[in-house]
Image (cartoon, coloured by chain):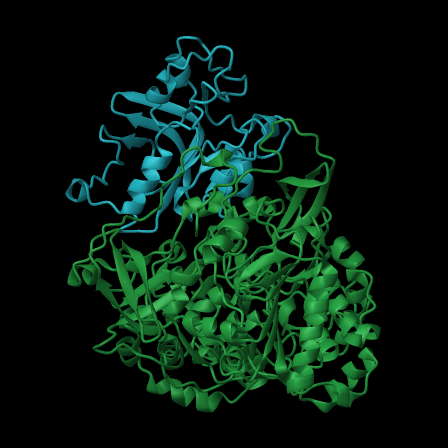
Chain colours: A green, B cyan
Amino acid sequence: MSKVEHLENIIERFGPHLHDAPWEGWQGDRQIDRVVDTHCPYCGMQCGMKLLVADEHVVGFEPRYDFPVNEGRLCPKGVTAYLQVHHPDRLLHPLIKRNGNFERASWDEAMDLVVSKFKELQDKHGKDSICVYSGSSLTTEKTYLVGKFARLGLGTRYIDYNGRLCMASAGAGNKKAFGIDRVANPWSDIPLAEVLIIAGANCAETFPIINGFLWKQRDNGGVWIVIDPRETATARQGDLHLQLRPGTDVAVTNGMLHVLIKERMIDQAFIDGRTNDWEATRETALKYTPAIASEISGVPTEKIVQAARIYGRAKTGMVMHARGIEHHSNGTENVLSYINLVLATGKIGAAGRGYGTITGQGNGQGGREHGQKADQLPGYRSIENPEHRKYIAGVWGIDESELPEAGISAVEAFEKMRIGEIKGLLSICSNMMVSLPDTNRVRKSLENVEFNVNIDFFMSESSRYADVVLPGTTWSEDEGTTTNGEGRVIKINKAVDPPGEARRDWEILQEIAERMGRGKYFGFSSPREIWDELRVASKGGSADYYGITYEKIDAQDGVFWPCPTLESPGTPRLFEEKFAHPDGRAKFHPIEYKGAEEKPDDEYPLIFTSGRIVHQYLSGNQTRRIKFLVDQCPEPYVEIHPETAHKYSINDGERVKVISRRGEGVFPALIVRTIRPDTIFIPYHWGEQLAANQITNPALDPTSKIPEFKACAARIEKIHSRELPILGQGRRGASQSEVIKGYQL
Amino acid sequence: MFIDPQRCIGCRSCVAACRECSTHKGFSMIFVDYIDRAETTATMPTVCMHCNEPTCAQVCPADAIKQTDDGIVMTALKPRCLDCRNCVNACPFGVPKYNSAMHLQMKCDMCYDRTSEGLKPMCASVCPTGALAFGTYEQIVPLRRTKPVNVHVFGNQKVETRVYLMVPSETEEINVDGCGVFEGRVRADVAGEESWIDTQVEMSDKSNEF
């Protein structure tokens, strides 16, 4: 059994330590040997950036003004991204845990152990006793290989990835409504829209660069309607803020649809000509008068009416949403209810008329298309569809019967580890101890797994639980493609070689496969070779990448899929003529309001919601080591409305206990009028006792299996703590720091 | 250079990017403040305003702070700087910082190494929203609904700056009263009640010393 026995020792050796200076310190007159055009490793914007290389080290960045998405702009994570490359916490050689301590091992030794343990488990308990858990911050080449590795290298059905925690419900909703899962419009359409509905998307903090498009729209005279339980910077800057109770989106959208119908602002010609199932949807919406919608959501009636009128009367408009509406046990329904607004007004499929989720992870789009999802094969094919299975079996040179069946979603797989049905785990590019809901249960799963292998380039909170940790590479040490949030396939370029004995992730997986005796399916010698097989594997699927070559990506500043032929320039805007369902029509879905699985009660009277801050990326394994970013927000806090704080006699900055049915944590109170009195908020990027996910509810959306991170019942308790928030400590002279020992966040 | 506070999202990308300018050696010359976090998420960046008649240069006993022909007020010249900190204390915008290790005043030089070669300064290059924008007056006016104003009135002192603040179109000059708060936004009622986050950021960033 693998447990974390010597946490302090692990932190001392592997961090997170705070580091904040380029290789060999800040220098004014460094000779730059080469400048590498690439992209930021973080969010779904995939901003262009240039990395500066001196003496085979990444020593800085330069804005990439000519890349059309960001034109040089970067958020603070992007600006400081290069500082992770030569960070002293980098894992430089394989580690094997012996007696609770990680010991340095050779690759041979580590690989021998991994392969012998995997073989032993599979011999004893069957092929499906091992689970592969991956991530969407990997390049598309790697995500494709992970899927192939699980099915062919290990022969297990159990593979899933952290996109399940990201936008799975948006993907499911898009497939139901449109027949395809991709944002419908390029971001360059945003400035052309008269009105934007931005729902559950804290664009200011989570997609800072999309704000460039938003403000261009504003400069053109556009209007923003922001739907969010918190007055985020985006909500504050917007024209109309619908500050709803978390989890009540369906009430708001149905209320808006009600007004659109009653005031004849729907586009009947579009509904008749291009959609199905309107009548049932219309009838459902008519039940939700603005007064009823207001009662459920807590948004004033007149704001719901006003929002409907602004959107309904505009000729052009776009609806955009993100995790705020998606992270719910009815996430798919939330998504579908927003799509109903889009379809009812016919605002899709043209310049400035559009819709889309804003994907969070760097390769959130590409990573969900090519087969690392439990039920999916490359090109958005289904592992349950005999035709699809046959095609992919053909590409891989196997008999269709060798292809495993569909697996199960992330949260379900970790539950199987907890109860001992899955015995082995290979995780890559994921930090489950931060990112999965109900941290205490995840810990039990990781402790219960008999053999646990983790590939990462920093020791994450989850790596600590592994038996073997294999050092992978940062984005700057390999090449490959990602697909950004607008469906644009872009190319990450290699700047330097991996440090120490670290290896590229695809090389690590290939070697395991080879040692498992499956080498003949994994003979790739470069990402380009993987890419070329992926192009063929995706051919004819709904995410058709066949016509996208590395050269075309360079020549066109990215290529929007689908791109079925070598001649095709790609498809920036979808649905201009038809939708992707077989009959070419989009589908309405009547949605009734259900709300969150767990609603507040006497014992847990508040609604807890979690989210992100601009200075950290996802589980923080990369960004919680960069001192500049940590300085801006060194620890999570709990946002409480002054009325609520007064009720519990809580002072600003005082540490309080936040408790749910699943767990509890202590956080400093940030008393702000920007949150609803019935709601509290904690940013989620930290692990262990600082994890917001100690509190969250692992209830799953039945369609997409996305967990309900965004609403559960909780209470706060005064603990009479005198300990102050740590923000501000050690900020002076921040920029010259080297490694600071003993800083344990 | 233009500052458009309504667009600021408080991300501090400018603060991070400022450190990358090769003359800054890792020190940032920009502040981003919460206006009043307890009430709002509003934030505001402060960069050197590059006064036409810079107070910092006027009070320098060693004439260490030079203005270029194109109006950029430079960091103090190392051989001349006397460690006196007159400039740090005199600047009406609170911009220059004192680097105790280097015995030198440091301030924004508008990324002179970049701007003199036709590149944008680092902060305005990376700013996600255009809250910091680099360009000419003629370029920005047709792009924005706010108006560039560069006259700041501090009590009896009127300061004209090369950096403009984007403000509502009826505004002619920016009046800052003796208490250091914008006119019309005097908040004496909540004095002492600002959020810990405001205080912390201010204490650490506004020490005017590295």
Residue lying at 37% horizontally and 56% vertically, measured from the top left: A636
As rendered, which of A414 and A204 lies closer to the eye? A414
* Image x and y of residue A550, in percent: 78, 58
Direction from residue A438 to residue A403 in the image, left or right:
right
Residue lying at 23% horizontally and 28% vertically, measured from the top left: B178
Answer yes or no: is residue B102 visible.
yes
* Image x and y of residue B207, in percent: 35, 30
Write down the quadrant of residue A655 in the picture.
Answer: bottom left
Write down the quadrant of residue A176 in the picture.
Answer: bottom right
Residue lying at 47% horizontally and 47% vertically, measured from the top left: A629
Extreme-top residue of the structure: B62
Direction from residue B12 to residue A680 in the image, left or right:
left
* Image x and y of residue A3, in percent: 50, 67
Extreme-front residue of the structure: A99
Direction from residue A623 to residue A296 in the image, left or right:
left
As rendered, which of A2 and A533 lies closer to the eye? A2
* Image x and y of residue A520, in percent: 84, 74
Answer yes or no: is residue A581 visible.
no
Write down the quadrant of residue A732 in the picture.
Answer: top left
Q: Is residue B58 above or below residue A579?
A: above
As rendered, which of A720 and B143 lies closer to the eye? A720
Q: Is residue B61 above or below residue A315?
A: above
Residue lying at 19% horizontally and 61% vertically, measured from the top left: A643
